[in-house]
Image (cartoon, rainbow, N blue to C red):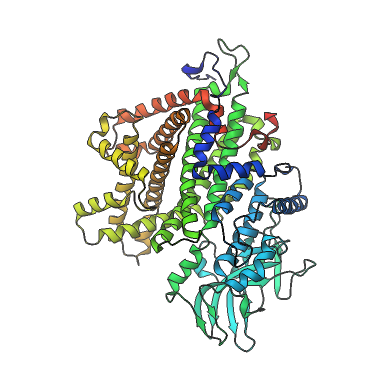
Amino acid sequence: MTQVLDASTTSAPDTSPSPGLGAALCTALDGPLADRRAQARAAFPSEHLLRDPDQGIDEARDWVLNRLTELSDAGFGSAGVPRNADDVADPAAAVITFEMLAHGDLSTLIKSGVQWGLFGGAVTNLGTRWHHDTFLPDITSMKLLGCYAMTELGHGSDVSGLETTITYIPETDEYEVRSETPEATKAYIGNAARDGEMAVVFGQLLVRGKNHGVHAVLVPIRDEDGADLPGVTSFDHGGKGGLLGVDNGMLRFDRVRVPREMLLDRYGGVDAEGRYSSPIDNPNRRFFTMLGTLVRGRVCIAAGGGVAARRALSIATRYALKRRQFAAPGHPDGVVLMDYLIHQRRLLPGIARAYALGFAQNELTAALVHIQGGGAHTEREQRQLETMAAGLKATATRFANDTIQECREACGGAGYMAENRLVGLRADADVFATFEGDNTVLLQLVAKALLTDYKQVWGDLDRVGMVQATARMVGGTMLERTAANLLVDRLVATARRRPDELALVDRGWHAYLFEERERHALESLARRMRRASSKDFDAVNRLGDHMLFVAKAHLERVLLEAFIAGIEACTDPAAKAVLQRLCSLYALSSINDDRAWFIEHNRITTGRAKAIGAQLSALCGELRPDALALVEGLGIPESWLGATFLE
């Protein structure tokens, strides 16, 4: 087998990074939250960070519960969740804590998300003062372990179609919770198989014969001895593809009665006179408002997926800097893996994308803080947050799954050993693509949100007017314009005048192509959607692939603009220069992946498309000497990686 080396690194390259470069890159990537993230890393209890991969299911569950208790006692876990009605939620603390937990055992991460993010988050966001004072102290202290019973066997992404019913009984002033059909069984619920004592149960609220749509009610499910309470039946899912330490299970309810006060009625419920009332009259708007308050889960899962990918890239890159294979002239002991160009092309574009996602995550977290931090915000900003959270969750978790697999393969047989952590990480991160919303469905939501905004500016415009309106809209859909966005506008305006004359690493050319890809794809989808009747399932169904392309094109632009903003905010000259090369590597990799589209739509020539491949190799060669600093910049201490082959 012929091995291809990067010509720029064949003469015994220096593998040590520039002094302080890794730390400067980490500070830049951490962005506005750099100080808080640094403090969290310093305080994080890392002694029991990773679980023994040889544990069985019961042992793993015990270990995870004990670890979670340890983290809770140390102040990690419930951080950011209010402890009573007078406590103020800190969304940034919640996201940072989730990020820190993602550096360790992912079963612990997800169990924490169930307890505090989902169970505690539902009580916080859907409940009232009474619920907060009554339940949050025990939830945050782990005296009350709970679960989040939304998904049903027959209804996963289709939350509005849930079959579980919550029926008001006026004679006793209670609610009766029922799962009348097998499809109404709550399934895949974390904490449901063993540890949960109470569940937030989502179902159709029926009051005096009228269905008021999906609401949530608190239902005790186990007694102090762990036995199911009357009317509750729990099932253990047992072994899964990963997350061995999370006790996922199913729940059935047979005429379970709870007091009227147990309904989480911030957005609607029955009053003391037995009448239903809600501050939001429109049922659809009420439904989406309720779900919108739970957006933090998607923000956190996006962050967790990003950290999982960073862990894999850190392990694989560090291994590639020490592992030697195949003797070559000047390398009698074998060539360092990272000196092979093909190995650089496997890992360095992933690192570049990890940085892009990290900068975008910073903007998403900032938007969450703006919406849920107690300040004033508009309904449009809430929708933008929900769309961005859906899109980045899908993007980051898809990236995590693809990247962990690539890193596993890049480490050969050693990567397949459980002691080197990659196979366990791959198994645990797999389901990230499913929970908090199936990724394909989330991308469809992004496309639908873009079409909604498009329709608002498109109206009855002719083709020229539609093009102009789309150009104005693209770039302002997710978040309000910032100084960095305005910089991108100027770059695009310059590139639009002479795109074929610009260098392949010209940032304006990248921004121009990213914007053109999104603009053209969205405009053509809108035209096709306009011709298709919403009542014609087959006509709309045929647009599925187009919708996914639009969503991905939009999110690629969001990532590029976030990367550009991160570079602009960087104050360290050496780090800034490296980030510029990384950004070019990310942008050209994205363009290269869609080169057929760009050629077919006359945005680049075939000659220029071929040149991109050579430019990608050149960028990898330029970044090779700083490979260690690049993964140091991802913010994961080597001692936290736990891979035996790095010792």
The quarter of the picture where residue 144 lies is bottom right
The quarter of the picture where residue 207 lies is bottom right
Which residue occupies 56% across, 40% down? 309
Which residue occupies 51% across, 73% down? 267
Residue extending furthest toward the bottom: 171
Which residue occupies 63% across, 14% down? 333
Q: Position of residue 134 (x, y in %)?
A: 66, 71
Q: Position of residue 80 (x, y in %)?
A: 59, 56
The quarter of the picture where residue 543 lies is bottom left
Q: Is residue 505 left or right of residue 140?
A: left
Relative to 226, residue 465 above or below: above
Of the pair 454 and 362, the residue shown nearer to us: 362
Q: Is residue 4 left or right of residue 519?
A: right
Instruction: Specify the quadrant that holds the C terminus.
Output: top right
- The answer to whether residue 297 is seen in the rendering is yes
Q: Position of residue 193 (x, y in %)?
A: 71, 61
